[in-house]
Image (cartoon, grey):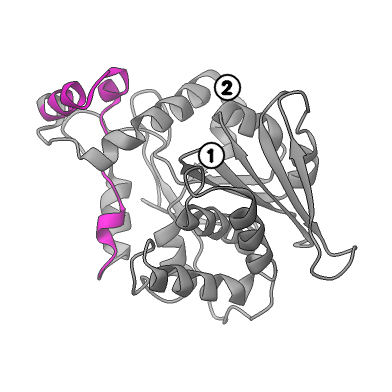
Amino acid sequence: MRSRCLRLRHCRGAQAGAARIYRRNRAFACGAAAGMSRGGYVGIDGCPGGWLAVALSEDGQSWAADVYEDINRLWEAHQEAKLLLIDMPIGLADGREPRACDALARELLKPGRTSSIFAAPVREVLGASSYAEANALQRKLSGRGLSRQSWGLVPKIRRLDELLQQDPEARGGFRESHPELCFAQLFGGPMHHGKKTPEGFAERLTHLRRVCAHADAIVAELLARYPRKALARDDMLDALALAVTGWLSGGELRQVPAEGDADRTGLRRTISFYKPEGRTLAAGSP
C-alpha cells in the first residue's frame, strides 16, 4: 500500500515520555499502522489535509496518529482494528424524512452544543458539482436547504460512501460517531466552550488527560509535525476523543436510535457513543 502519510508512534517500552517519529513518503508502505491497530481502536476525523486517524492499541500501551489523503488508504492501514469510529455521516437522508440519529444526538447535546450536529444531505447531493446545484436538489427533495457547512463535507461524505458501497468489510468496520456527543457522554454534559476557541481547546484537552495518559504527547507531536493548513487543532482532539471512546467502551457502545434504521442502500444510520455507568473516569487511565 502506497500512501503519503506521517507515522507518529509512542511506545512505553522505550524511554519514558519519548516518541519515535517515522516519516513515510510515497515510496514507503505504511503497513505498520495496520499492525499497531490490530485489535485496537481508531478515531477518525476529516481535516484539511484529508483524514486524521488516531489509534490506541487494545492494551493502551501504544498509539499512532496519521493523516491520510484518501479514506481508502486509511482503511487499508487500519482494517484489522477492532473498531473504527468516524465523524462523518454513514447512511444518508432519504427524501423529506431527516435522519433520526441527527435529531436524537442534538437532544443529547442540549444545552449549548446542538448546532454541532449538521443535517446529513440527501443522497442525490453527492452528485452535485456546485453549492447552488446541491442546495437546489436538497430543497427540492427534502423541503429544506443545504447549509454551507454541510456542503463543505460533501466531498468527504462521497468518498466514504463510495468505500462503504464497494467494500462489505469496510461497511462492517466503520461506525459513525460524533466528538461533541462523546465528550458530553464521557464527562457529564456538553462542553461549555466552542471547540475552536482557546478555552474550548483547553477544556477538551483537560478532560482527555483524565482518561488518556498519551493525550499531551499525541497533541504535541501533531502540532509539531503538521501545519494548521493541513490539520487544525480541534481536529486532533476530535479524533482522539473518538479513539478514547472506542478504547473505554471495549467495543460495547450505545447508539441513537437504539434500534437503528437504514437508508435505501442498506447503510445503517446511527451515531455511536459510550456512557460510563456507575464509575468515575480515573485520571491517568490509558
Q: Quadrant of residue 93?
A: top left
3D distance between C-alphas at marks 1 and 2: 19 Å
Q: Which amino acid does label 1 sit on?
A: Trp
Residue 112: image x %, image y %?
26, 68
**Callout in the foreground (1, 2):** 1
Which residue is at the front of the view, 16 or 267? 16
Q: Quadrant of residue 81?
A: top right
Q: In which quarter of the image is residue 245?
A: bottom right
- Residue located at (47% from left, 73% from top): 202
Asked whether residue 79 is in view, the answer is no
Is residue 129 covered in magenta? yes
Residue 88: image x %, image y %?
42, 41
Is residue 58 covered in magenta? no
The magenta stretch is 112-139
Residue 167: numbered disc: 2
* Quarter of the image that includes the N terminus: top right
Residue 231: image x %, image y %?
51, 47
Mark 2 neighbour density, 10 Å: few (under 14) some (14–19) many (20 or more): few
Asked whether residue 177 is in view, the answer is yes
Residue 279: numbered disc: none
Marks 1 & 2, CB-CB < 8 Å contact: no
Q: Is residue 17 left or right of residue 183?
A: right
Where is 31 relative to 56, above or below?
Answer: above
Task: Residue under label 1, please give it.
Answer: 51
Q: What residue occupies the far right of the structure in this picture?
A: 14
Check disc 1 and report its element: helix, strand or loop: strand
**Which SS type dominates the magenta stretch?**
helix
- Residue located at (62% from left, 72% from top): 211
Where is 100 relative to 202, above or below?
Answer: above
Check disc 2 and report its element: helix, strand or loop: loop
